[in-house]
Amino acid sequence: MDARCADAVFYNGNVITMDARHGTVRAIAVAEGRIVGVGEDKEMKDVAPRGSDSIDLGGRTVLPGFIDCHTHFIQMGVDSMNVDLSRTRSIEEALAAMKDAAKKTPEGAWVIGANWKESGWKDGRFITGKDLDGCCPDHPAVAHRVCGHMSSVNTMAINALGITPQTPDVGRDSSGKLTGILTESAVVIARTATAPDKAKKAKALALATKKAHSLGVTSIHDNGETADFRTYRDAEAAGKLGVRVWFNYPANALDMLNALSVSKGVGSDWLRIGGVKLFCDGALGARSAALSEPYADDAGNKGMFVHDSSEFEGIVRKANASGHQLAIHAIGDMGISALETALAESPMKDHRHRIEHLELPSRAHLTRMRKSKIIASMQPNFIGEWGGTNGMYMDRLGAKRTSRNNPFGEALEARLKLVFGSDCMPFSPLYGIHSAVNAPHASQRIDVASSISAYTADAAFASFDERRKGSLSEGKLADFIVLSDNPFEAPSMISSMSVLKTIVGGNIVYEKRRATGG
């Protein structure tokens, strides 16, 4: 393939290829969804066939399309159709939003709120069942915390879900009465009972894709439910899948995958079976992440493990021995230890196992990960949301642990493969890049090039895709974005930059409208 077969040339740009062989160039030639040439304007335009499209990039900075390595993509679309609590500034405002939604909902039907975060509220307390009883007395109501590891339900919902004080992972007061606060397995009960139907999931995917394009995301690694794969497959069959998906199945699908002899990489340029997502522990926001020392704001609580150690280690060994890539949600080191044991028993040459989040590793943990070639899949936007001296991390962990949580800089110093995702909290690579570059603590900060690579070239490596995407060079998929400004020239302003164009497979799928006066 070369530029002589191009059907379009994008020229007059500051094209940062993220490929050491090319560096920064001016133009990209594409044909049939792939890059057929990168170089200078005259070079690309002179050899392109007469009649091919020419798109002026206006001198703007161009990067490979962002790859978000940790999403709950369809759920993000579903949440956008529920009551959005993410921007509420107080618990009263959140409850008022739920009350307004209840007024528009048929009596007895569910009222579902999404993405509340008490860290942004003045009193900083969780929503309780009593709160929801007050604003939704005639409806079963559930309000999901932003982390996905905690939800609040009212009395009608408790009855509808069949939850009792004996149900695991439910909150109880000092008298043993249910508080309406659910964590981990109890959250699954609420999610299952209110799961969207096929049509709503299809709409959710379309909404999430539109958002992705506006933020420059062209590929995702999704940690969905087993049924979500069908939603992606149906969209691809209809020619409506607008992002490239690496789909990580939940661990409870492991036996099914093995029975069908299905493993990572099976699929197309649009949809591929990825790894196996396994939960080790919970989340810091919900105080369910497993810690070696108690939470600073909850003495005696060290969090929880989702599985006991023998069960967890058994799943890891089974998945590894079957040739699956593992994506382990782990705040501490239990996931690292289990992977080390599994790899010792059943060595896999190019496993690319991943620890997701990895918010509190020690330097020793990072060294062990390097030795076992485990990828650090981390979320820099968490620093933007909850870092600093007044953030949620300080409340949960105290000053000492907060200064070393999410240590992106130390991960790179340990020569780990570092990749970035958002967990959809919030879904925005530029915000994540800004948060890593401008992080409050030295252990966290990394440079612009490394941060962008964690969302592009290195991100592609995490899904065995480094030969197909992640950088802009001949033969790779023509997925790239045009930015309003150059992140390398204004690193302190990255979060205020925007995506002007998103190109997927050589086609412009998003173009920012210019503001008009009047």
Image: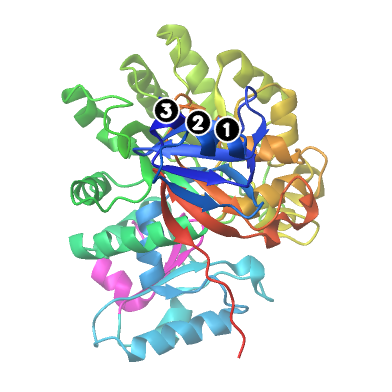
Using a 10 Å C-alpha cutoff, classify the residue at mark 1 as few (fewer than 14 neighbours), some (14 to 19) or many (20 or more). some
Q: Looking at the image, can residue 381 be seen? A: no
Q: Earlier in the sequence, mark 2 or mark 3?
A: 2
Q: Image quarter for residue 404?
A: top right
Q: Quadrant of the N terminus?
A: top left
**In front of the other: label 2 or label 3?**
2
The magenta-colored residue range is: 140-168
Viewer-proximal residue, 419 or 410? 419
Residue kind at label 2, given as amino acid type:
Gly
Mark 1 lies on residue: 43
Residue kind at label 1, given as amino acid type:
Glu
Residue kind at label 3, given as amino acid type:
Leu
Q: Image quarter for residue 111?
A: bottom left
Mark 3 lies on residue: 326
Residue 165 in the magenta stretch? The answer is: yes
- Distance (Cα) linking label 2 and label 3: 35 Å
**In front of the other: label 3 or label 1?**
1
Instruction: Find residue 115 and report its horizontal and vertical position in percent.
Output: 49, 66
Indicate the secondary structure of the residue bearing disc 3: strand
User: Are the residues flagged by discs 2 and 1 in contact, CB closer than 8 Å?
Assistant: yes
Indicate the secondary structure of the residue bearing disc 1: helix
Instruction: Find residue 432 and report its horizontal and vertical position in percent.
Output: 63, 50
Indicate the secondary structure of the residue bearing disc 2: strand
Mark 2 lies on residue: 37
Q: Image quarter for residue 366?
A: top right
